[in-house]
């Protein structure tokens, strides 16, 4: 199992992006969290199989219909805790 931490920049708030990420992550069997950041970006942390994480990254580059993704920064790491499910942090 691997973990990614992704920061998505652009028009990613107020466009249902967190719900989009949660749906995609759950459909891939991933665990983790997604939240809006104060700087207007979005952060997702996900754990699972490498191929499933790579698929999630592809989805992050596209985003939901109303989003405009300008940048996705991804860092790969070993998990230091195990998440239960995939949750939106409000």
Image (cartoon, rainbow, N blue to C red):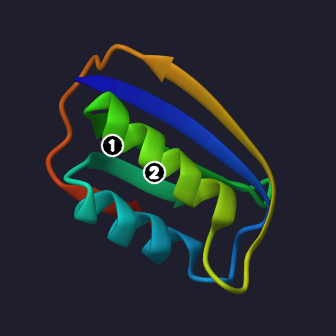
x%, y% of residue 70?
Answer: 85, 55
Task: Give the residue pinned by disc 2.
Answer: 56
Furthest-left residue in view?
84
Task: Give the residue pinned by disc 1.
Answer: 52
Q: Residues within 10 Å of mark 1 (few under 14, many from 20)?
A: some
Identify the residue at image location x=31%, y=23%: 2
User: Is there a contact, CB below 8 Å, between mark 1 and mark 2?
Assistant: yes
Quarter of the rendering containing residue 67: bottom right
Q: Residues within 10 Å of mark 2 (few under 14, many from 20)?
A: some
Identify the residue at image location x=46%, y=56%: 34
x%, y% of residue 27?
Answer: 25, 65
Left/right of residue 51 with respect to residue 19 in the rendered view: left
Work out whether residue 46 can be spotted.
no
Using the image, determine if residue 29 lies above or below residue 78: below
x%, y% of residue 12?
Answer: 72, 68
Using the image, determine if residue 57 lies above or below residue 79: below
Identify the residue at image location x=14%, y=47%: 84
Q: Between residue 65 and residue 78, name the one nearer to us.
A: 65
Tell me the number on the disc at residue 21.
none
Report how many numbered discs are placed on residues in the image. 2
Identify the residue at image location x=44%, y=76%: 19
x%, y% of residue 1?
Answer: 22, 23
- Secondary structure under tag 2 reads helix
- Secondary structure under tag 1 reads helix
Using the image, determine if residue 17 lies above or below residue 53: below
Using the image, determine if residue 53 lies above or below residue 17: above
Left/right of residue 82 with respect to residue 5 in the rendered view: left
Work out whether residue 8 can be spotted.
yes
Q: CA distance from mark 1 to mark 2?
A: 6 Å
């Amino acid at each position: 199992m691997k973990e990614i931490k992704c920061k998505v920049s652009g028009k990613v708030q107020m466009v249902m992006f967190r719900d989009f990420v949660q749906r995609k992550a759950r459909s891939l069997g991933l665990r983790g969290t997604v939240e809006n950041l104060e700087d207007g970006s979005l952060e997702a942390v996900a754990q699972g199989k490498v191929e499933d994480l790579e698929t999630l990254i592809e989805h992050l580059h596209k985003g939901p219909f109303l989003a405009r993704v300008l940048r996705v920064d991804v860092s790969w790491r070993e998990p230091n805790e195990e998440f239960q499910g995939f949750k939106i942090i409000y």
